[in-house]
Structure formats: C-alpha cells, structure tokens
Image (spheres, rainbow, N blue to C red):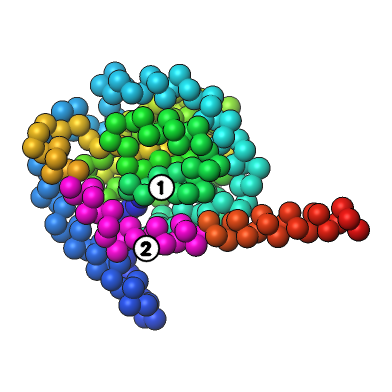
Amino acid sequence: MRYRMGAVSEAQGKSLWDRVVALTIRIGEAVLAPVERFIGKRSLVGDATFFPLERFPWVKHIEDNWTVIREEAERLLEVQGDLANFQDISKDQIEITDDDRWKTFFIYGYGFEAKLGVEMCPRTAALMREVPGMSTAMISILSPRKHILDHRGPYKGVLRYHLGLIVPKDAEACRIRVGEDIRHWEEGKSLIFDDTFNHEVWNETDETRVVLFVDVLRPLPFPESLINRLIIKVIGFSPFVLDAKRNQETWERGFIERRKDRAGAGAAQTVG
C-alpha cells in the first residue's frame, strides 16, 4: 500500500508493534534516500512533477473504460460513511488527515489483494491487473472542504496515477499541487505524477471528489528495473506495510459484520 513516510512520534504508551513500525519508517528513509537520487537519474521517463501521458501506453485503455470504474465507485458512495478513513488503514496518515473526510477503498496494496475491494469492484480490479507494474490501486473519496496537508510519498521507484471519476463542477477549486505545479482533475482524464515531490490537495467546493488512485513501477532500464522490483517486494513485507494490511483486514471484517447486522435488522422489521 502507499503511505507517507514522515517522522512518526514515539509518544508514551505506544505498543511494541507501533515502535517497530516507527523504527522501520526511519530506517527506510535513511536507506532509500541515496537510492532515490540514483533512480531519478536513470528514469526512462525523466525526473519531473507531472508526466506526459503518451509515455504510458496503458493509460488509453483505462480512460476508454473510465465509466466502468465510475459505476463501481458510485456504488461505494452509497456506503461512504462506512468506508475506512485513510488514517485508519495507514496510521502514519494522521500527520496529514485526522477527520473522516478522506475515505479510501483499497483494491490492491503493495502487491496484496484487498479481498473485499476485488469483490465489490470486480471490473475495476480486472482493469488494474492489466496495468503494467501496478502495485497499489484504490478509490479515493475526498469530501467537500477537505484539505490534505503538504506531504511526500515514501519511494521514488513508483509513480502515482489519478483518473478523475467524479469531479466538482467548479474544477478550479479542486486541485493538486506537486512541487510548484498545480493541476485539476477532469472526469475520464488522467494525471501521472511523482509523489516524492511535496504535494498538497484541496477540495474547496461543496461537492465530493472521487478518483482512481494507482501506484505503478517507474520505468527504468535493466538491471535497475529488477532492483526496483525487489525493493518494492521488500517494502511490501516490511512491518510498516504489514501493519496497514492488518488494519485493512480488520476494517473489512467490521464492514461485513455491520452490513449483516443491518440486513438482519431490516428483515426483522419486515417480518414485524
């Protein structure tokens, strides 16, 4: 899964597991810093904030099927209140969001399949499996008047892809800044950027913004491409990611139980 690798405070009372996760983040930052500089120099698509879409041939196929993805995302909005807040899955996100106005629905995360995500968004999941180097895929839902604070991604070996699914009418008031560059989402249109540049998001409208959020391996020459895949694999089995995977599975169980309880209560009222 994709997370911010900012410093994590070791507040008194933290569990041993939380301290292990925090230590993993600090070690990862130190180890990956020189690797990232090398990757930026060797990147086959350059080292920039945003990238021309024609460098990624798979984008057209996703855009051609954007309404399929939107239909599944719209069904998620029917249960938006029950969806996970990003910081509920990735505890480190509390540094940039601490309310219930940024909802995420994972389908894949750092190579792991989110079982519920695949079940509820099967056509989106199938499309994501066709994306070369896909490591993470989720639906990102940003409520009205939500601001995601300035932050950076954990590792330059992946690039971030956004597909606009539901965009407020006043698109100019719903924007993303990457480095010093600002872009706006459009429905059915894509953005690809390097999230290791500091970035920030605003939805200054009274409408909800929904995007497909995907991380893909950065195009690199061989053998750097192989090394990059190995690094992604190692990150996927780090305590940091395994903690998020565990949180995701816990949330899925709770979501399913709540739906069962409501279905049972509805059936009881009908009988009564």
* Viewer-side residue, 132 vs 144: 132
Q: Is residue 248 magenta?
A: yes
Q: Left or right: 90 with respect to 55? A: right
Q: Which residue is mark 1?
A: 113
Q: Secondary structure at mark 2?
A: helix
Judged by its main secondary structure, the magenta piece is: helix
Q: Position of residue 258 (x, y in %)?
A: 65, 59
The range drawn in magenta is: 230-251
Query: Do callouts 2 and 1 mark residues in contact (Cβ within 8 Å)?
Result: no
Q: Left or right: 246 with respect to 117? A: left
Q: Position of residue 177 (x, y in %)?
A: 36, 37
The amino acid marked with disc number 1 is: Glu
Q: Residue at x 33, y 23 (%)?
A: 58
Q: Which residue is mark 2?
A: 243
Tag of residue 33: none
Q: CA distance from mark 2 to mark 1?
A: 15 Å
Note whether 87 is above or below 70 in the view shown: below
From this viewpoint, is residue 41 visible? no
From this viewpoint, is residue 100 visible? yes
Q: Left or right: 261 with respect to 41? A: right
Please tell me in which quadrant of the rendered image residue 244 appears.
Answer: bottom left
* Viewer-side residue, 225 vs 129: 129
Pointer 2 local density, CA inside 10 Å: few below 14, some 14–19, many at least 20? some
